[in-house]
Image (cartoon, helix red, strand yellow):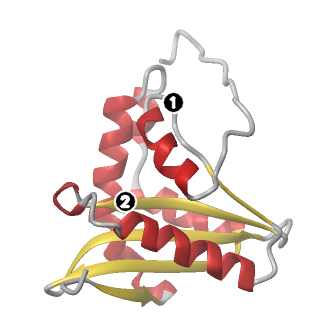
Amino acid sequence: MTNYQLKRLDINEIDLIRPLWEKLNLTHMDLSTHFRKRFQEANWENRKTKLIEKSEELLLETVVEKNLIIGYCISSIDKGNNKTGEIDSIYIDETHRKCGLGKLLINHAVDWLISKGTTEQKLLVGVGNERVLDFYKQLNFMPLHIVLQRIDKDKS
């Protein structure tokens, strides 16, 4: 991993993550079994606003290669419950996967969340993206709930 650098972003630099978040959103759209339209309608500005509004504190960490951001992880501490931390979004460009970068980002996020006093660290995995479950299990993230959401057939 000598070609890669980790860089923390200030909240004012959050838009640097946008191109990779948009790739992640397209991936979720392609994988989604029932909520494709939701991902089609998703946009960065709304996602960014929700992250900032819900968070007491955010960690924005990127992986940089040759001055290009090739991965990121966004973690937050919940405003309503500062004992709960979440890894809200993580993405590594396809050409840089299987290099340990995802594990590095997750481990940094967990360390940060624990250092901030959280006693619970969580993340969500969208249905259709179950292939990542084994990766997260290696990092001690285990399934806890299955949440079902009703679809209005007229709007899907």
Q: Is residue 144 above or below residue 89?
A: above
Secondary structure of the residue carrying numbered label 1:
loop
- Circle 1 packing at 10 Å, graded few (<14), some (14-19), many (20+), is some
Please report the residue visible at 53 percent of the width from the left and 54 percent of the height from the top: 138
Instruction: Look at the image and tell me whether residue 82 can be seen.
Output: yes
Give the labeled residue for mark 2.
91
Please report the residue visible at 44 percent of the width from the left and 21 percent of the height from the top: 33
The reply, left or right, for residue 77 in relation to residue 50 is right
Q: Where is residue 39 in the image (x, y as percent from the top left)?
A: 41, 38
Marks 1 & 2, CB-CB < 8 Å contact: no
The reply, left or right, for residue 45 in relation to residue 144 is left
Secondary structure of the residue carrying numbered label 2:
strand
Q: Is residue 51 above or below residue 37?
A: below
Residue 20: numbered disc: none
What is the CA distance from the residue labelled 1 to the residue labelled 2? 17 Å
Under mark 1, the amino acid is Val
Q: In which quarter of the image is residue 64?
A: bottom left
Q: Position of residue 21 (x, y in %)?
A: 36, 59
Q: Which of 54 and 4 is in front in this view?
A: 4
Please report the residue visible at 30 percent of the width from the left and 43 percent of the height from the top: 26
Q: Where is residue 67 in the image (x, y as percent from the top left)?
A: 17, 87
Residue 127: numbered disc: 1
Which quadrant: the N terminus?
A: bottom left
